[in-house]
């Protein structure tokens, strides 16, 4: 709207009166005062004139034939075009002038006839000023409204963008953990209103993703995650959700479960989808996933509890050998708590010296005498009691604490044997076997650390036997061969531990300089006949011999097993039949009694 009092166009005043005399007089005076004046001799003419051009102000006589001033004013006020035009009524003193009615029909002011021109001009100026002030305010308001609207739009789009950022994963563009929590919150609310409502949450974790990252580089790892995200998306039904929780973890939320569906059907689909390889830079890569499943319903109150339970179930799937799924059961929770407690307490246990070593004799089967010991770590936990290495070593590996713990074992075992040698309690060839975990084996400083400890303790290198599992070697076969050759050169002996439980490939054995092969106790135990032609033991012994390796049978518990292993020419034996892992003082007592089997 333009400013009507602007200096460019003169102010337009419409004078309405049925008396030509009055009109003439008024228009002369107003023209002299600088106004542009139009005239209307009846109400009808006035209405036509305003339609042709909206005036800035109207002077309106009340008493007119046909249509009186009130009616004219009423019509002007109902038309949006003319609504805002100020109307000043003119009325003779003897008119049945009703001031109240003048204002009721929308009049702005009134002037009684006969009028003083000064008064008319003063009122006109006053109302024009008011009018222009109103208009200015209205204009400001419209501008302000437009600006507010614009800002609101900007804010809304910024908010939407922010929300997208906050709730989505930068790499895969999938919803992220925050978005998942929001969704679970909503579903739990739905379940709280309807106890029959169920949904499933599947937590997927890629197995051995670190190896892919380490060998192909992080960029390829990222690409692979994007491929995985796409493949998961193709499995979804409308309304279901897949999100990336970070790293190589994805979560799937399935809605509309049938009453008997526990999410495993879908987990089967996922497993199947991962059977096909992913193609990255013309290379085919196979990825396995471990999946934890939780059925969400009104028994859950918080999304975090659902995620905690999927995590626990997923951990069980991994522990059961990976590439599997597990549905959460409450009993899993207790062991998960124990896992957490062990994880937190491990660090403290090193400082508090809660680890000790037990030693299990290894017997030379041809002489029947103890020829060495295997150092086996024990953890005397102040609250949980004795904890098996089978339980805490995997946790120590995951947290990296296996490094200090492994060195502690190596140092203590070497010191111990050296002590006994100095006291002449054992023969100079007596050996000490120490277990190395896969993580220790992969550590770049391993060889230096071992040499350092041998120097420190002055133990002759040929008395030390390092036990390594197949999987530790297969994790990185090329550098493993280097490490093993280094040890060999220093006359440190090497044993392949738990043979038969891992890759069990005899064919690759020759590429590694192994001195001893330890047959896993699962091959010995429970078998009543280990003789030639029965099972794998005779074959393993025969092949090891052709490769110039000594064979150690683990887990001998009966005289029968001992006799059969002897007849197979197995070199060494270890097991409860001879002795359980013993404390140092018990070891010395046993050796002093010079036992023969
Ligand atoms: P491993 O190296 O194969 O050690 C042999 C395990 O078999 C020991 O279990 C031993 O107590 C058990 N054993 C020996 N003879 C018999 C038998 O006749 N019957 C039965 N049922 N079991 C027998 P332990 O001490 O519980 O150790 C379990 C595993 O923990 C070890 O298996 C080894 O892999 C790991 N471990 C133990 N100490 C260390 C360590 O200092 N460092 C590392 N990295 N791993 C260790
Ligand atoms: Mg061992
Ligand atoms: Mg073993």
Image (cartoon, rainbow, N blue to C red):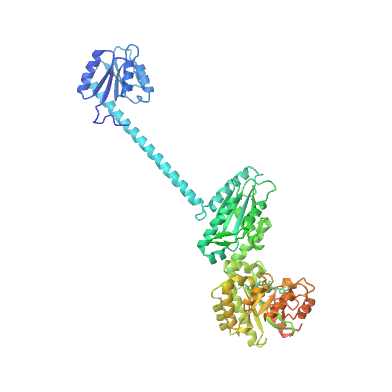
Point out the quarter of the image occupied by ligand 1: bottom right
What is the quadrant of residue 369 in the picture?
bottom right
What residue sits 67% from the left and 58% below the top?
332
One can see residue 308 in this view: no
Tell which of 282 and 508 is nearer to you: 282
Q: Disc count in the image?
A: 0
**Which quarter of the rendering shows the C terminus?**
bottom right
The answer to whether one can see residue 136 in this image is yes
**Where does residue 482 sit, x and y in percent of width and height?**
57, 77
> Observer-nearest residue: 413 or 575?
575
Q: Nearer the viewer, residue 189 or 94?
A: 189
Examine the rendered structure and indicate whether residue 596 appears above or below residue 107.
below
Q: Is residue 112 above or below residue 230?
A: above
Give the residue at x 38% y 37%. 145
Find the residue positioned furthest to the front. 282
369 left or right of 476 in image: right
Q: Is residue 333 above or below residue 155?
A: below
Q: Quadrant of the N terminus?
A: top left
Q: Quadrant of residue 483 in the image?
A: bottom right
Q: Position of residue 472 (x, y in %)?
A: 61, 71
438 left or right of 149 in image: right
Residue 270: percent from the left, percent from the top? 63, 54
| Above or below: residue 471 compared with residue 296 | below
Between 349 and 272, which is closer to the camera in this rendering? Answer: 272
In the image, 260: left or right of 171?
A: right
Where is residue 478? Give x, y as percent: 57, 73
Which quadrant of the structure image shows residue 194?
top right
């Amino acid at each position: 709207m333009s400013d009507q009092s602007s200096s460019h166009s003169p102010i337009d005043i419409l004078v309405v009166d049925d008396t030509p005399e009055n009109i003439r007089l008024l228009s002369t005076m107003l023209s002299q005062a600088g106004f542009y004046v139009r005239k209307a001799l009846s109400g009808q003419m006035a209405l036509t004139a305003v339609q042709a051009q909206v005036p800035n102000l109207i002077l309106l006589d009340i008493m007119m034939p046909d249509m009186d001033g009130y009616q004219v004013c009423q019509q002007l006020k109902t038309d949006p075009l003319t609504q805002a035009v100020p109307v000043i009524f003119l009325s003779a003193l003897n008119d049945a002038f009703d001031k109240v009615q003048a204002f009721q029909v929308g009049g702005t002011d009134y002037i009684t006839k006969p009028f003083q021109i000064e008064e008319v001009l003063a009122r006109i100026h006053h109302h024009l000023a008011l009018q222009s002030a109103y208009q200015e305010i209205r204009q400001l308001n419209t501008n302000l409204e437009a600006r507010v609207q614009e800002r609101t739009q900007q804010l809304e789009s910024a908010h939407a963008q922010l929300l997208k950022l906050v709730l989505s994963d930068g790499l895969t563009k999938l919803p992220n953990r925050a978005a998942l929590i929001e969704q679970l919150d909503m579903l739990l609310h739905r379940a709280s209103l309807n106890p029959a409502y169920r949904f499933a949450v599947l937590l997927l974790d890629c197995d051995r993703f670190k190896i892919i990252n380490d060998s192909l580089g992080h960029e390829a790892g990222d690409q692979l995650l994007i491929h995985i995200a796409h493949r998961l998306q193709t499995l979804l039904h409308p309304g279901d959700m897949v999100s990336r929780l970070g790293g190589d973890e994805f979560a799937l939320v399935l809605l509309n479960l049938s009453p008997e569906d526990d999410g495993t059907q879908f987990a089967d689909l996922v497993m199947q989808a991962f059977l096909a390889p992913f193609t990255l830079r013309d290379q085919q890569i196979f990825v396995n996933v471990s999946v934890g499943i939780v059925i969400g319903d009104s028994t859950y109150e918080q999304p975090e509890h659902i995620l905690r339970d999927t995590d626990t179930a997923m951990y069980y799937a991994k522990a059961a050998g990976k590439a599997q799924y597990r549905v959460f059961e409450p009993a899993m929770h207790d062991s998960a708590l124990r896992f957490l407690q062990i994880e937190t307490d491990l660090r403290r246990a090193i400082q508090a010296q809660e680890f000790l070593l037990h030693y299990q004799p290894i017997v030379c089967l041809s002489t029947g005498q103890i020829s060495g010991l295997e150092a086996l770590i024990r953890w005397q936990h102040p609250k949980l009691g004795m904890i098996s290495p089978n339980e805490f070593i995997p946790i120590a590996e995951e947290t990296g604490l296996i490094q200090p713990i492994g060195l502690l074992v190596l140092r203590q075992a070497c010191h111990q044997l050296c002590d006994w040698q100095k006291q002449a309690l054992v023969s100079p060839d007596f050996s000490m076997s120490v277990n190395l975990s896969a993580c220790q084996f992969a550590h770049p400083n391993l060889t230096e650390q071992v040499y350092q400890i041998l120097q420190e303790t002055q133990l002759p290198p040929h008395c030390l036997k390092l036990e390594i599992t197949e999987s530790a070697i297969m994790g990185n076969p090329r550098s493993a061969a280097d490490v093993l050759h280094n040890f060999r050169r220093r006359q440190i002996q090497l044993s392949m531990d738990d043979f038969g439980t891992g890759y069990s490939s005899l064919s690759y054995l020759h590429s590694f300089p192994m001195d001893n092969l330890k047959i896993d106790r699962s091959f010995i135990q429970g078998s009543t006949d280990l003789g030639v032609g029965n099972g794998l033991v005779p074959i393993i012994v025969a092949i090891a011999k052709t490769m110039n390796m000594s064979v150690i049978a683990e887990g001998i518990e009966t005289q029968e097993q001992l006799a059969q292993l002897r007849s197979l020419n197995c070199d060494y034996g270890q097991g409860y039949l001879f002795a359980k892992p013993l404390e140092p003082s018990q070891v010395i007592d046993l050796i002093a009694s010079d036992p023969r089997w």
